[in-house]
Amino acid sequence: MSIPMLRLAKWGLISKRCFSNTTTCESGKTVNLFSAINQALDIALDTDPRSYIFGEDVSFGGVFRCTSGLADRYGKHRVFNTPLCEQGIVGFGIGLAAMICITDRETAQLQKSSLQIISFPLLIRHESLWSQIVNEAAKFRYRSGNQFNCGGLTIRSPYGAVGHGGHYHSQSPESFFCHVPGLKVVIPRSPQQAKGLLLSSIRDPNPVIFFEPKWLYRLAVEEVPEHDYMLPLSEAEVIRQGNDITLVGWGAQLALMEKACDDAEKAGISCELIDLKTLIPWDKETVEASVRKTGKLLVSHEAPVTGGFGAEISASIAERCFSRLEAPVARICGLDTPFPLVFEPFYMPTKNKILDAIKATVNY
Amino acid sequence: MQYREPGVLLWRGFTLQEFANQCFGNKADYGKGRQMPIHYGSNKLNYFTVSSTIATQLPHAVGAAYSLKMDKRDACTVTYFGDGGTSEGDFHAALNFAAVMEAPVIFLCRNNGWAISTPISEQFRSDGVVVKGQAYGIRSIRVDGNDTLAVYNAVRAAREMAINEHRPILIEALTYRVGHHSTSDDSTKYRSVDEIEHWRMTRDPVDRFRKWVVNSGLWSNEDESELRSDVRKKILHAIQVAEKLEKPPLADLFTDVYDRLPENLCEQERLVRDTIKKHPQDYPSDVPV
Ligand SMILES: Cc1ncc(C[n+]2csc(CCOP(=O)(O)OP(=O)(O)O)c2C)c(N)n1
């Protein structure tokens, strides 16, 4: 799935930057997820004068501290608070992003279409912004016959469990957006991944929804290169090699899956773990190749199991690898209930649920 | 209901124990431990359960008010929100619907100057909220929100107009949020301590009301300290009781998604129970299974 990479490489501006899978170009400091995101946003603002960051409470640094210092550095006209209105934030962002089509025509700087607009509602949790995202952002290019697009738009939003968030502060709505052609959906698993994937999302010529695992903002810490680098979209990564079963996940869930793999290993089961990273358009080839090797598949996500993105993966792999599958595809996911507070531990797709499913699938 | 209005519930008779039960999500919580603390609700007291999302409840208040009108009840609805909430589309939809449907609803905006870190100058450039009500053809009142008696009189008048004339009324109460937005907020990161202290010291609505009741001979410093220590004791007691009560039973995780359990949830409940048997150490011991 190297299409987005090629597309990005077209832009002289970007091909000079380090574009890597491994991100080991040079060493960096050990930072947490929100600092890595802050670095990416800083670079985005620094490298493109036409990039903006706006949303609720961003100017003092944001509720999750991702935008600290940026308003001071780039000024209040580029990093600013908006009124409290998610549909307004996205609608405004679409208009701002779409103007690139006009200014580029006027200035004939066609290849430099890397305008970035980054807005972030605190959580994608206000239904009224649905219309702006689904009916406007997703279809802007298609309905105009590619005369216009709002590809510069990147919508950042926290997602997922935090241990105490209840209904509204823990949801994983990624599969809704995967069902809207025209949007890309990206979810990073770690600080290093977040920085590279966010920069790619910002510079991708399509509107991207970038979900940040809330649980990891402070918790996930790793070495992050300080320079400008991008990680390719729509390219999954095998983060652990194995032969007996393939596991697919994304975001915060991968840490649990990794632990389940460790425990399975002790029981003599060799697991291959894949980070999907981009949910749509997703890298079927990598998953397919792995399942052809292992003959078994387990998908895990926090969102409710019914209609979750695991269902799509499961169906696609059944279509492509039917004769190779040795067991039904296992889905270890959230329950079909609203996200609960006191019952959160019961709702969650825990390590042991995954481990049990690994064993059951392998011994099918 | 918005999250900042426990006072209304208290006034209607929600007990300290009921508040504490919700905050601890124990088995006596009417919300069955499903929501974060302060998301109270009471059917008995006609108080729709709080949801975290801003302004989403405003149109509900209009629908509920229309129902009261159609049933010829001697009542209106009231919905509370902040200055930030007035930027949401739901606010505008609610006002417009209320005006057109002639619904007996009171929109009570607590304009406290801040929506988390966003000051009103970054929220709107209109002359506050009162003019927005007027623009929708809604009679709108602006009142000093730090003046208890003025607020009381405004709401009283609003209620009469809403019920007798079948019309919505908007009240904008001007005040200031002296506290942090929530327990996870440090508001000195975005506003000066001087500003906060100024409002706390010179404009505090509680101090002001206290002065009035004391000067009127209705209240004394002794009454006050007695009340304070009495209430503190009651709250501590309520918290201790709430803390000790066990959590709601596991079955409550699955009920109320629909009026009855569909097959997918029955199956998931069975799977969860199997998992608990296999891995009891993964699960909190205070939730009965
Ligand atoms: C739809 C929605 N967007 C964002 C939030 C996050 N949020 C919670 S409270 C708040 C500020 C609300 O300010 P205001 O309406 O003025 O009420 P106040 O807290 O000052 O009473 C925000 C942005 C939310 N809860 N719901």
Image (spheres, coloured by chain):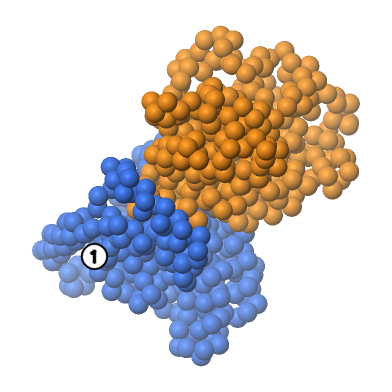
Chain colours: A orange, B blue
Image quadrant in which you'd find residue B254: bottom left
Classify mark 1: helix, strand or loop: helix
| Residue A213 shows up from this direction | no
Classify A56 as above or below B10.
above
**Frontmost residue, A152 versus A209:** A209
The three-letter code of the residue at mark 1 reads: Leu
x and y percentages locating residue B74 in the rendered image? 45, 88
Question: In the rendered view, does B131 fall on the left or right side of A349?
Answer: right
**Frontmost residue, A246 versus B88:** A246
Question: In the rendered view, does B243 fall on the left or right side of B137?
Answer: left
Quarter of the N terminus of chain A within the rendering: top right
Q: For the point 51% across and 18% down, which residue is it?
A: A224
Question: In the rendered view, does A293 fall on the left or right side of A107?
Answer: left
x and y percentages locating residue A250 in the rendered image? 55, 35
- What residue did someone put label 1 on? B16
Q: For the point 89% across and 31% down, which residue is it?
A: A106
Q: Residues within 10 Å of mark 1 (few under 14, many from 20)?
A: some
